[in-house]
């Protein structure tokens, strides 16, 4: 899969993982794992990029004596998810065209 395409899909997956409730890195990995493999070394740069693009915000909260970063999706992040759903319809249409059986 093309790197840019995969990168965009991973971004959307991370946003989807925190869409319904704030979450932290390890939990995000656990939530995504049934669908695709993602490591900490992949996740944290994505989280930083999404924060830089104002698609999520970060807050620190103490948990068991340690600070844990919680990620919250912003309106820009919700917009990106909605845009992805719209784009996906077009991608599926293209996929159907490419994989159609040629009529003889």
Image (cartoon, helix red, strand yellow):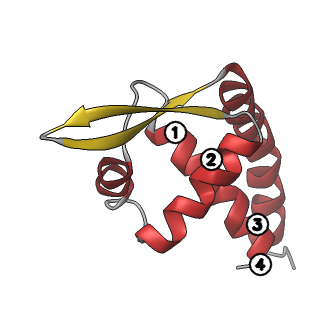
Q: CA distance from mark 3 to mark 2?
A: 11 Å
Sequence-wise, which precedes: disc 2 or disc 4? Answer: 4
Disc 3 crowd, CA 10 A, few/some/many (<14, 14-19, 20+): few
Q: Which residue is mark 2?
A: 12
Whether residues under marks 3 and 1 lie with C-beta atoms below 8 angstroms apart, the answer is no
Q: Pick out the residue farthest to the front.
A: 65
Q: Where residue 2 is drawn, which disc sits there?
A: 4
Disc 4 crowd, CA 10 A, few/some/many (<14, 14-19, 20+): few
Q: CA distance from mark 3 to mark 1?
A: 17 Å
For residue 43, above or below residue 99: above
Q: Is residue 27 or residue 86 the one in the foreground?
A: 27
Whether residues under marks 1 and 4 lie with C-beta atoms below 8 angstroms apart, the answer is no
Q: Residue at 39% across / 55% down in the picture?
A: 32
Instruction: Indicate the secondary structure of the residue bearing disc 3.
Output: helix
Q: Which residue is mark 3?
A: 5
For residue 79, above or below residue 11: above
Quarter occupied by the C terminus: bottom right
Tell me where residue 51 appears, x and y as whole percent: 66, 41
Q: Residue at 78% across / 34% down in the picture?
A: 83
Q: Which residue is mark 1?
A: 16
Instruction: Indicate the secondary structure of the residue bearing disc 1.
Output: helix
Sequence-wise, which precedes: disc 3 or disc 1? Answer: 3
Tell me where residue 50 appears, x and y as whole percent: 67, 45
Q: Is residue 50 or residue 91 the one in the foreground?
A: 50
Quarter occupied by the N terminus: bottom right
Tell me where residue 70 appears, x and y as whole percent: 41, 36
- Image quadrant where residue 60 sits: top left
Whether residues under marks 4 and 3 lie with C-beta atoms below 8 angstroms apart, the answer is yes
Whether residues under marks 2 and 1 lie with C-beta atoms below 8 angstroms apart, the answer is yes
Instruction: Indicate the secondary structure of the residue bearing disc 2.
Output: helix
Q: Horizontally, is 58 left or right of 28 in the view? A: right
Q: Residue at 12% across / 40% down in the picture?
A: 64
């Amino acid at each position: 899969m093309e790197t840019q395409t995969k990168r965009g899909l991973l971004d959307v997956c991370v946003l989807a993982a925190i869409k319904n409730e704030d979450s932290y890195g390890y939990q995000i990995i656990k939530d995504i794992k049934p669908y695709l493999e993602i490591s900490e070394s992949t996740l944290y740069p994505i989280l930083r990029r999404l924060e830089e693009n104002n698609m999520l915000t970060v807050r620190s909260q103490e948990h068991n004596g340690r600070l844990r970063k919680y990620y919250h999706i912003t309106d820009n992040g919700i917009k990106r998810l909605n845009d992805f759903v719209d784009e996906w319809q077009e991608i599926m249409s293209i996929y159907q065209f490419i994989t159609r059986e040629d009529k003889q």
